Image (spheres, rainbow, N blue to C red):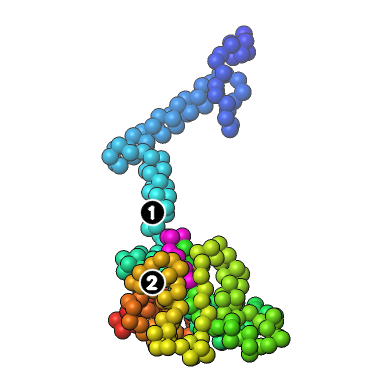
Amino acid sequence: LPLVRALRAPAAPLGAGAPLLGGPAGRRWAAGVDRNERDRQLVDEANARGYGGISISGLFFAGVGCVGGGWYAGWFERADARREYQLADRLKAQGCRIVVFELDGVLSSAKAQGCVPKHELDLFLQGTSQDWLPAVKALAFRGFKLAIATRSDPSVWDKTLGSNRDRYLVGPELATALILKRCPEVLPAFEIMVGYDPQAHQAAPEDSGKRYHMRRIAKHYGAAPGELVLFDTSAGDLANEEGWHGVLVRDVRQGFQFSDYLQAPANAVS
């Protein structure tokens, strides 16, 4: 009969070490389970009172939400990781919507003088400015129009290289090759690339420096001179009377750097 009564007794919750049958041992085990459950409830209530009614689990998930929101809001981004957008914002505030770059010493620090044998293109690409890549991507993303203004003149190189001309990349061809290799998604923003050597053409004063280049680029985009900015390594090539802006790239060994504009001295930006 005791065995029958034990078999008829309500089954205790199973768990690690739980007795399989009823009886005193089973009742003691069930009582322990109840006490443990009451203890957990008391702890949770105490925690809730201590944190203004917010449970520990609630605090945890709220913290995770704050961290995730901060990540998307940019709280944890390094300052230098956002310089490309500072550049875009400041150029826009200055009234610029067309950004123009010299090739040599700006896009690349390689000493190419605007002409590279095709089989040495990879060496030229190794000198690509590491600041220029994120900068030009951000500018294109923000809707700026882009252009190249270089003294590497294809018509001059045609005469200089003669029958070997097809073995070389010069001026706009070289700039196009660099962009295709390093950031092809921005190439459509470069609607015009001007390769012109004013000295070789004995240009009039109004076409000296980069005046001819910038005039052609402004005409192509239907822009006023004040809407253009040129990044160049030569202070003389930045001189103009038409009103376009110029930024001096100060270290040809590095090429374009954000600091050329964001931290430039007053006489380096016109």
Q: Amino acid at mark 1?
A: Ala
Label for residue 26? Answer: none
Q: Report whether 202 appears left or right of 157.
A: left
The local secondary structure at tag 2 comes to: strand
Give residue 48's quadrant in the image: top left
Using the numbered discs, state the Cα–Cα distance from disc 2 to disc 1 in whole angstroms.
32 Å
Q: Which residue is mark 1?
A: 73
Asked whether 43 or 101 is in front, the reply is 101
Q: Residue at x 38, y 79 (%)?
A: 247
Which mark is in front, 2 or 1?
2
Q: Is residue 128 above or below residue 76?
A: below
Is there any visible trace of residue 32 in the rendered image? yes
Q: Residue at x 63, y 85 (%)?
A: 158
**Magenta-drawn segment:** 141-147
Question: Alpha-carbon neighbours of circle 2 within 10 Å: few (<14), some, or many (≥20)?
Answer: many
Q: Residue at x 42, y 60 (%)?
A: 142
Q: Is residue 46 above or below residue 115?
A: above
Q: Report whether 11 appears left or right of 52.
A: right
Q: Which residue is mark 2?
A: 228
